[in-house]
Amino acid sequence: MRKRDLLILLGSIAAAAAVALSVFATSALSTGSWGLSFRQEGTPPVGNAGQDQLRRYDAAYLGDTSQKVIYLTFDAGYECGSTAKILDVLKQHQAPAAFFLVGSYIEKNADLVRRMAEEGHIVGNHTMHHYDMSKLSDKDAFAKELTDLETLYKEITGKDMEKYYRPPQGIYSEKNLKMAQELGYKTVFWSLAYVDWLQDDQPTRQQALNKLLPRMHPGAVLLLHSTSQTNAEILDELLTTWEAEGYRFASIAELFTPRS
């Protein structure tokens, strides 16, 4: 082989290796907490994993960004008297939502859980005990956290739990996402949230509005905690404002519907 041909061959190998490394880097998901970077108000944030990466595991954090649509989701580990009002507002606006619940919530608040289901909302799986699921590498232990909640939900409502999963605290690993997928679950992260869960340090109405309204964007998956008194107080105002801006509210099932 002539020197020129050898140099061309080595160059081709180096280029192929660089492409392979780039593909690996963009495809690998590291263990960590879900996070967002907002670059510009009114536009979707960048997640610490991309939509294409998440899609491989039936996971999503964002809907169709060409449409003014909002997916309302609520997380709850306990009840503090705000959920009934939240449900009233959702009914008033005919807005579907998803409530991601843990085992103790379902055990202690059966009437509210039944109401969620009866009024057409999705009750999603936030696990039985709200563990850091990234530390559960054993498939059976991981599955038990989800299937035990499924069983409890069916005992309370008589219905099968729809298979939508939100990792506690947003902590995930690639292995977890794959295990959830193998159990038939779709994992739902979020594209808009704020610090609303501290009971002793609730945001004021204006603080909450200042965080949420400028950052709303097409295709948003909104995470609120139904334990927040502030959220219960401002929800009607939020939904009314977004409706006036031309947004509609849709079920998270739409996140996983193939787009035409």
Image (cartoon, grey):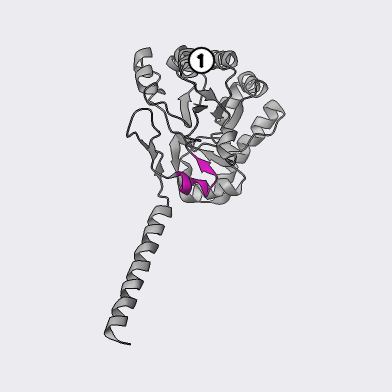
Magenta region: which residues?
A: 51-60
Figure check: 6 above or below 120: below
Where residue 10 appears, x then y in whole percent? 32, 76
Q: Is residue 55 magenta?
A: yes
Figure check: 176 above or below 107: below
**Is any atom of residue 201 visible in this view?**
no
Q: Is residue 32 magenta?
A: no
Q: Quadrant of the N terminus?
A: bottom left
Residue at x 69% of width, y 34% of height: 160
Q: Depth check: give the residue in front, 195 or 106.
A: 195
Q: Quadrant of the C terminus?
A: top right
Q: Depth check: give the residue in front, 102 or 3.
A: 3
At numbered mark 1, what does the secondary structure look like: helix, strand or loop? loop
Q: Quadrant of residue 254?
A: top right
Q: Quadrant of residue 169?
A: top left
* Residue 126 shown left or right of residue 20 in the figure: right
Q: Which residue is mark 1?
A: 82
Residue type, label 1: Ser
Where residue 146 appears, x then y in whole percent? 59, 40
Residue at x 57% of width, y 21% of height: 95
